Amino acid sequence: MGRAAAWIALVCAVAAPRAATAQESDVPQVRFALALAGRGNLGEFGSRFDRGWLWGVEAGWQPGRLGVAWAIQWSVPQWAAVPLGGSFSTGDPAIVDEIVSIMEMSLGPRIRWPLSDRVPHFALLAGGATLMRTSIPIPPDARRSYLGPYAALGYEQLLAGRYMVGVEVRYEMIGVGPSSIGARLSLAFGSR
């Protein structure tokens, strides 16, 4: 219980409210984003379906004017295990389907730190749970559904007071299934 209390104290200290900077008060509270990402699979899943792309939508909400902003993020990317701009062959005759489609939903908090008082840009730290469903059974457990944690680091830049461009690096299914590492580019628009 001591470790859990220490983590809770750390999160509360980091997220403690403080006076908002000018850029924080200008950031949209509600945001919707379109995202495009490239992803590389790890482990046995990665040996069969190496790299691919995904696209999706995200929705977020930043309550209040906290120095560290919390957001709820939801994404539903569609994944095809083919390289960008080409086709993909597994090279494994045991695999009938050369392409795997994945529907994925994730939900979790995001912590956003302002990087300066003049330029409205932010560092991001995110984590949460991902539910993944595939078109065919995939390694490591030959199942079609997996639930596991994700972690992400990123950067966002506010443009014209309403739009945000972001980049994010994500590690999905940490230690519980078909793990992957990906980079995501998003264009968000929002309102106060």
Image (cartoon, rainbow, N blue to C red):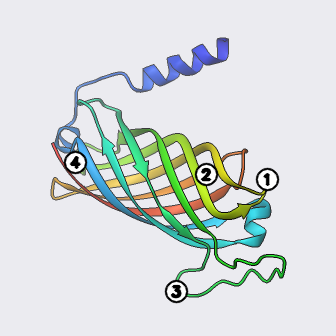
Distance Cα–Cα, label 4 vs label 2: 34 Å
Distance Cα–Cα, label 1 vs label 4: 50 Å
For disc 1, the marked residue is 141
Distance Cα–Cα, label 1 vs label 3: 30 Å
Total marks shown come to 4
Indicate the amino acid at tag 2. Answer: Glu
Would you call the spot at circle 1 few (<14 residues within 10 Å), some (14-19), or many (20 or more)?
some
Q: Nearer the viewer, mark 1 or mark 3?
A: 1
For disc 4, the marked residue is 118
For disc 3, the marked residue is 85
Q: Is residue 16 above or below residue 77?
A: above
Q: Quadrant of residue 157?
A: bottom left
Would you call the spot at circle 4 few (<14 residues within 10 Å), some (14-19), or many (20 or more)?
few
Q: Is residue 13 above or below residue 23?
A: above
Q: Nearer the viewer, mark 1 or mark 4?
A: 1
**Answer yes or no: do the residues labelled 3 and 4 have beta carbons within 8 Å?**
no
Mark 1 vs 2, N-terminal side: 1
Q: Name the spot of residue 64 as percent of width and height, x first.
A: 23, 30
Q: Is residue 103 above or below residue 106?
A: below
Indicate the amino acid at tag 1. Answer: Asp
| SS under mark 3 | loop
Q: Nearer the viewer, mark 1 or mark 2?
A: 1
Indicate the amino acid at tag 3. Answer: Gly
